[in-house]
Image (tube, grey):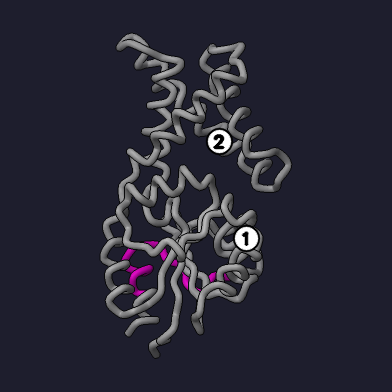
Amino acid sequence: MRLKKAAFFFDLDNTLFDYEASFKKASLFAFRSIFSSGEQNNKLEEKWFPHYKTFCDFYWQAYEKAWITRKEYQKKRLSSSLRAVGIRNVNEQEVQRYQQRFERNIHHFVELYPWIQDMIQILKHNEIMYGIISNGEADVQRNKIKHLNLDIPEKQIYISSEINVAKPSPEIFHLVRKNVKASAFCYVGDSYSLDMVPAIQAGWTAIWWNPSMLDVTNDKVPHYNCYSSDEIVEAIMRYIE
């Protein structure tokens, strides 16, 4: 059964493109430009990044639970990883320079998942409303969207730093519902805790892009649990055909 006035919204990082691959390339670029130079230091950056990724994951829970701020999270993960490869006494200015270099260049490294562009065209052709709901800094996220060359209307892009509410609060989904005229709302995202749980709490249809085959961790069960691009396209097509 086709929902004539359905609205589809997508998360950005790791949903529309492979954020992990882009993150690694941009991180190495920023590290190389500040802490490493010359061919002789290639081994240092190769040694550093696995530590950086480990500390990103290690401090993520504290950030996700709001025990530390975003800036504190960024500082802790960088400082800890640098100490792990023998770079000590890093000052606040160097941390800021690294983060700025990373944020100003990551959009150069993003590449759209192959199936997304076709999916956007199908939604557009069938007059299904679509947009983006994303956490993050506006300039950084908008540069990514621009580089991905997605045909998404400006009024259908919601970024947390611009509207002062962020996932996992369901309020961001309530806000979109108030602003968009549709009879059904669907959200596609890769994070169970940040995307699926608040979408379900807000009464949206939750479509989980879950290629890592992670488990549901509480009673909020996504309407669709998709392990492959074929499965997610099939789930979306059910609202079109």
The magenta-colored residue range is 221-235
Q: Residue furthest front?
A: 155
85 is higher (above) or lower (below) than 151: above
Q: Quadrant of the N terminus?
A: bottom left
Numbered tag placed on residue 217 in the rendering: 1
16 is higher (above) or lower (below) than 20: below
Q: Nearer the viewer, mark 2 or mark 1?
A: 2
Q: Position of residue 135 (x, y in %)?
A: 55, 52
User: Quick check: 225 left or right of 107?
Assistant: right
User: Which of the two labelled residues, at mark 2 and mark 1, occupies the earlier sequence position?
Assistant: 2
Q: Residue at x 43, y 49 (%)?
A: 142
Badge 1 crowding class, 10 Å Cα cut-off, few under 14, some 14 to 19, many 20 or more, is few
Does residue 53 appear in the picture of this structure? yes
Residue 75 occupies quadrant? top right
**Between 127 and 22, which is closer to the camera in this rendering?**
127
Q: Say if the magenta span includes residue 236.
A: no
Which residue is labeled 2 in the image? 56
Whole-angstrom CA distance, mark 2 to mark 1, is 21 Å
